Image: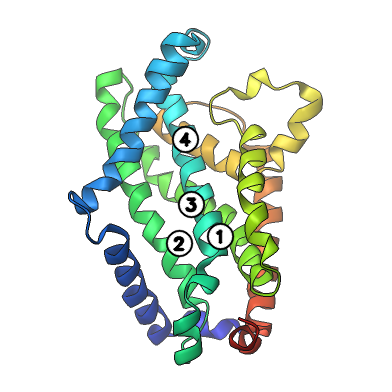
Amino acid sequence: MFGILLKKDFWELVKVFTWRELKMKYAQTYIGIFWMIFPPIMALFIASFFFGNLLRVSKEIQNYTLFAYCGMMGWYYFSYLITYTSISLIQNMDIIHKSNIPKLVIPLSKAFVGLFDVLVWLAIAIILKPFLGISFKLSMIFLVFAVLFNFIAGFSIGIWLAILSVRWRDIYQIIPYLIGFTMLITPVFYHLNMVPSSLKFFLYLNPVAGSIELYRRYIVNTYEDLTFFMLGFVVVFVLLLLGLWIFFKNEKNIAETL
C-alpha cells in the first residue's frame, strides 16, 4: 500500500503533474511566475504598516515586521495546502476517469506547487535579515524542518478533506470557515506570551503554530521553548498516516464516486 511512495515512476508522475499545475497557475498572466512575489510583498506591507504602525504592536515585539512575516508565511502555506489539496480530486475528475494514474499524484502535485511560493517567501525573508539587523546563524539550515512540518500540518488535513469531499461535496463549503477559525487560534500576528496560560495547551495542539515558531526561531532568532509543540506534530503525523491509509484503501472507488 505505502510501497508506491518508494517507486521512482510515482515521483516522476508527481514531477510532471507539478510542472503542469505550475504552468496552469500562471498561464495567460502578464507577469507570469512573478506573481509569486506579490503575496510576500503584501505580507510585509501588512506587517510593517498596519500592525506595526497603526496598531503599534511592533513596540511589544522585537523585529515585529519579520516576526509577523514568518507567521503569515507559515499560515499562507498551511491554508494553501488545505484549500487546494482538498478540492484537487474534484477539479481533476476528467483525468481520474480517463487514466489509471495513482490518485495521490494529484493532491501531491498541488501541494508541491505551493512549495515554490514558500521558497520565494523564504528568500525574501533571508534577504531582509541583514537590513533589519538580524544576524545569520548556521542553525538556519534547519529551516528545512520548518517547511517539512508546515507541509505535514497542511497536507495531513487536506488529504482527509479530499477523501471526504469526494463523497460529501458539502465539505468544500466548510473549508473557508475551517481556515478562518484556525487562524484565530494560531499565533500569526501575536506572541505566545500574549496567550493566557490556561489556553496554551490548545495552542500547542495546533501544528501550524509549531511550524510558525520554527520559522521564527531560524529567521528572527527567537528562542521559544518548542517542546510542547511536539504534541501537535505527533497528532498531525498520526493524521497523515491514517489519511494516507484510508486514501489508498478507497483509491479504487474514487473514480466511481466522482
Tag 4–tag 3 contact (CB < 8 Å): no
Which kind of residue does numbered mark 3 sit on?
A: Tyr
Which residue carries the number 3 mark? 80
Which residue carries the number 2 mark? 111
Which kind of residue does numbered mark 1 sit on?
A: Phe
Please name the residue shown 60% across and 38% down the image. Answer: 209
Secondary element at image label 2: helix
Q: Position of residue 127 (x, y in %)?
A: 25, 32
Q: Label 3 neighbourhood size at 10 Å, few (<14), some (14-19), many (20+)?
A: many
Please name the residue shown 70% across and 38% down the image. Answer: 204
Secondary element at image label 4: helix
Distance CA(mark 1)–CA(mark 2): 7 Å
Q: Position of residue 171 (x, y in %)?
A: 68, 61
Which residue is situated farthest in the right direction here?
198
Q: Position of residue 236 (x, y in %)?
A: 66, 55
Can residue 146 be seen here?
yes
Q: Which numbered disc, 4 or 3, marks the residue that appears first in the sequence? A: 4
> Comparing marks 1 and 3, which lies closer to the viewer?
3
